[in-house]
Amino acid sequence: MLAVSDDAPLLADLMPWSVAPLRLGRDWVVAPDERTLRSRWELLVRSEGAERERLFGPSRARTLRSAVAALPGRAAGTGPFAQERGPCPAPVRIQHGPFDEQWLIPDQRLIDAARPELWRVADERQLFVVEQGYVPKEAGPAVTVSAVLPDGRSPAGRPGRIRPLHRRPGGLEPNLAPGLLAFLRATYGSDVAAADVLAWIVAAARPGAAGCSVPLSADPQLWSAGVELGRQMCTVMVRGARSGEKPRLPGGRRPYVRAALPARPRELCYDAEEETLHVGDGRISPVPRQAWEFQVGGVRMLELWFQRRTEPAEPGTLGAVGPASWPQEWTSDLLELITVLALLAELRPRQAELATGPGLTREHLVSAGVLPVPAAARRPASVFDHHEEGPGGQFALI
C-alpha cells in the first residue's frame, strides 16, 4: 500500500469541483436491463389515480404533481407525471456504485436529485472520478473512474463525491486546481496533461477520515511510472469506452460459462481450489481468487452485483417488475465484471512501488500559489450554449 504523509494534498484540492451523489428517491428507476425499465414505465403510465401514486412512490422532492425541467441533453416530459401517457424515455447507462453498470430512466420528474450539472458536462470526452466511502481498516480502491454517468453510491461508509475531469463539454477546462499543471510541468521538466494527473490520482489516492488524499511524488521517474500504472487502471475501469477494446485476461485465464446458468439462480458461491464461481447450478471458470475477494468498503463486488439482481422486491411494486428468467446479457455483464476485478487486482501490487522517494506536500503547493484554490474553481462552470427545456415545456432562462 502507498505511504501517505499527513501533509499530502487532498483530492478536494487537486480536483476542486465536486458534485454530491445522485439521490434517486425511488429504486425502481434503475435496473440491470433496459427492458425492465420500459416495462415498469408502461405499467406506471397505464395506472390511474391512487394506484399510480402508490406505484410512483412520492417523496418530499417528487410527487405526481411535480413539474421540473428536462435533464440536459435528454428528451423527457416536463409537466406533472400525473398527466404522463407517452413512451418511456430511452434509458441511459450509468455506473451504479463502484463497478456495477446498470440502466436509468433519465426523467428528472422521477429522480429526487439528478444533479443536472453533471449531465451538462457528460459527453464522449468526459471521465468521472468517484471518491469511495471511507471504512477504517478496509482495503479497496480510494477512487474509481467511469466513462458513463455515476450515481456516486458507496457500498459502505458515507457516499463520496463525484468529480468530472473536465468542467465543460468537449474535454475543455480541466477540473484541476489553477496552476497545478504548470507547477507539475516545472517540477518534472516534461509536459503534464490533465489525463496524466487523473491517472496518478487513480494509482496513488488513499482513503482517509478527513477525505481522500493524493501523495505526489517529487521524482520524475516515479511520477512517470505512476501515470503509466494509472492509465492501465483507468483503461480497465472504463471498460474500453475510449479505446473501443474491452478489457481481456490473457488466453487460458479468461472466464467462460462451463455449465449453463439456471433461469432463476438463488445463490452465489466460490470454489477457490477449482477457481470456479457457482451461480446456482451454473458454473463459470476460471475465476481468480482475487476477483472473488475484491472488495470496496468491506463489501465483495461480485456478491453485491448478484444480490442486486436476485434479491426479492416487495410484491406489487415496480421494483418487483423484472425479467422472468436470467437474461443472457446479465451473464455477459458478469463475465466482464470478473475480468475487470481480476485485472485491477493484478495491478494493485504495483501501487506499492509508488511509496518511495520524496513527496510534494500541501506546503509546496501553497508556496507555488496553487493552494488555496479560488472559490470559483469549486463551483460549476457556466456551460450554457443552448436552451434547456424547463418545467411545463418553457425554455429555461440562461
Image (spheres, grey):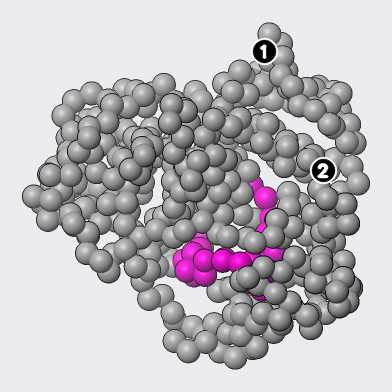
Q: Could you say which is closer to the camera, residue 60 or residue 27? A: 60
> Which residue sits at x=69%, y=84%?
79
Above or below — where is 127 with respect to 266?
below
The answer to whether residue 5 shows anywhere in this view is: yes
Q: Amino acid at mark 1?
A: Ala
Q: Could you say which is closer to the camera, residue 363 or residue 275? A: 363
> Which residue sits at x=46%, y=34%?
135
Q: Quadrant of residue 272?
A: top right
Badge 2: residue crowd in 10 Å (few <14, some 14–19, many ≥20)? few
Q: Quadrant of the N terminus?
A: top left
Q: Quadrant of residue 69?
A: bottom right
Query: Total label count?
Result: 2
Q: Magenta region: which residues?
A: 101-124
Report if residue 156 lies within the magenta region. no
Image-based side of 329 in relation to 237, left or right? right
Q: Quadrant of the C terminus?
A: bottom left
Above or below — where is 314 with respect to 336?
below
Give the mark nearer the N terminus: 2 vs 1: 1
Q: Could you say which is closer to the camera, residue 83 or residue 271? A: 83
Check disc 2 and report the residue beneath it: 312
| Helix, strand or loop for disc 2 | loop
The answer to whether residue 193 shows anywhere in this view is: no
> Which residue sits at x=28%, y=51%?
14
Check disc 1 and report the residue beneath it: 272
- Cβ atoms under marks 2 and 1 closer than 8 Å: no
The percent position of residue 103, horizontal first and vertical second, equals 69, 55
Rounded to the nearest angstrom, the CA distance separating label 2 from label 1 is 28 Å
Q: Between tags 2 and 1, which lies in front?
A: 2
The percent position of residue 67, horizontal first and vertical second, equals 65, 82
Q: Could you say which is closer to the camera, residue 224 or residue 369? A: 369
